[in-house]
Each structure stands twice: as C-alpha cells, then as structure tokens.
Amino acid sequence: MNPVLTRWNALDAESAAREVLPCCGSSAWAAQLAAKRPIVNEATLLEVSKTVWFSLPEEAWQEAFDSHPRIGQKHAQTHTTEESLRCSAQEQRTAVSEDEAAKLALEEANRHYEQRFGRIFIVCATGKTAREILSILDQRMTNDASTELREAAEQQRQITELRLRRWLEST
C-alpha cells in the first residue's frame, strides 16, 4: 500500500479531511472522502473521490471553485491554504504568459465569463498555454448555465485527480 495512504487511513476523520482539502477545496468532499476510509490504493482513491464529488450539491462545488485563483492570478476569492495556492501556481505555470496581450485577453475573458455564469472560470490548466485556455474559455461561453456547471465540475474533478496523484507521491 502507498505509504501516504497508509498514514492517511490511520488519521482521525478531522485530520484526514484537513489533509486532503487542498486537493479539492470543498470541505464536504474532504469530509466525505475521509469517511470512506480505509482506501487501499490509488485507483480506489480516485474512484471514490469522483463518486463523492459528483454526489455533492452545487454549494459544495462552488466552495471548491472559490478556492481557486483566476487563471493568471495568485489569490483565490476565498481564504485558502498555502498548499492550494502552491498547487494552483504549479498548474497554471504554462498559462502564465509573458505575452502581455494574452494576459489582458485572458483577464477580459475571465470577466465576461464571471458576468455570464456568476463564478470564476475553472479549467484544468496543467500544460495549457494562455492562448489554449482562451480558446477553451471562448468555446465554453456558448454553453447554457446547466451545461457549463457540469463542465466546470468535470474540470474540478480533473484538477482534484491531479492533486491527489501528487499528494500520493509526496513524502
């Protein structure tokens, strides 16, 4: 068994939830995931995480969305942990462009998205350039509110999965 999972499985529920919270940003997700222990391997962890995530109400999704900084920015809308901010910075590394025009276009597109959907734009930014993210954002602006909420939730699931994998590799 993975040593991180072994240690995590032995924690009390509150400590276990607190430890995985930076992977998602939703306290309901973290508490429910911790309640599903013991989890024996990475594949099971990822499957349980996905099941828990998609069972949560929209308010829990919104809490996770709010834990992210806007693409290209360093601070989230709500108080978040240093670990969450470090993860976001790592994920956005490719997207943080030296191209000033791309930065400005992304800022403007983010504003339009927030005006339309009432939340920040969530995308699994790992490995994507600012221009690629702009293209994705433009395409998603054509979604209706319900479709876009489901897409944002799927993007959050992908982000959470990447963060869980990194967490399992930590020592």
Image (spheres, helix red, strand yellow):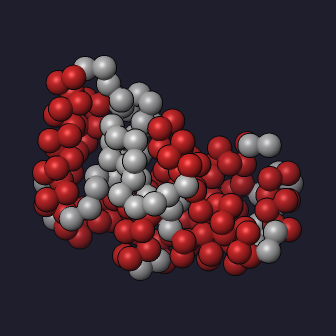
Q: How many marks?
A: 0
Residue at the outermost top position: 98
Q: Is residue 127 above or below residue 8?
A: above
Quadrant of res 106: top left
Q: Is residue 38 visible?
A: yes
Residue at the outermost front position: 79
For image coordinates 86% across by 68% down, the residue present is: 10
For image coordinates 13% across by 59% down, the residue present is: 115
For image coordinates 23% across by 30% down, the residue present is: 103
- Please identify the quadrant where the N terminus is shown: bottom right
The answer to whether residue 3 is left or right of residue 151 is: right
Q: Position of residue 59 (x, y in %)?
A: 38, 76
The answer to whether residue 110 is left or right of residue 66 is: left
The answer to whether residue 150 is left or right of residue 141 is: right
Q: Is residue 161 visible?
A: no
The answer to whether residue 10 is left or right of residue 80 is: right
- Please identify the quadrant where the C terminus is shown: top right
Front position in the image: 41 or 17: 17
Q: Position of residue 70 (x, y in %)?
A: 32, 47
Quadrant of res 154: bottom left
Q: Position of residue 79 (x, y in %)?
A: 45, 60
For image coordinates 31% across by 20% down, the residue present is: 98
Q: Position of residue 61 (x, y in %)?
A: 41, 69
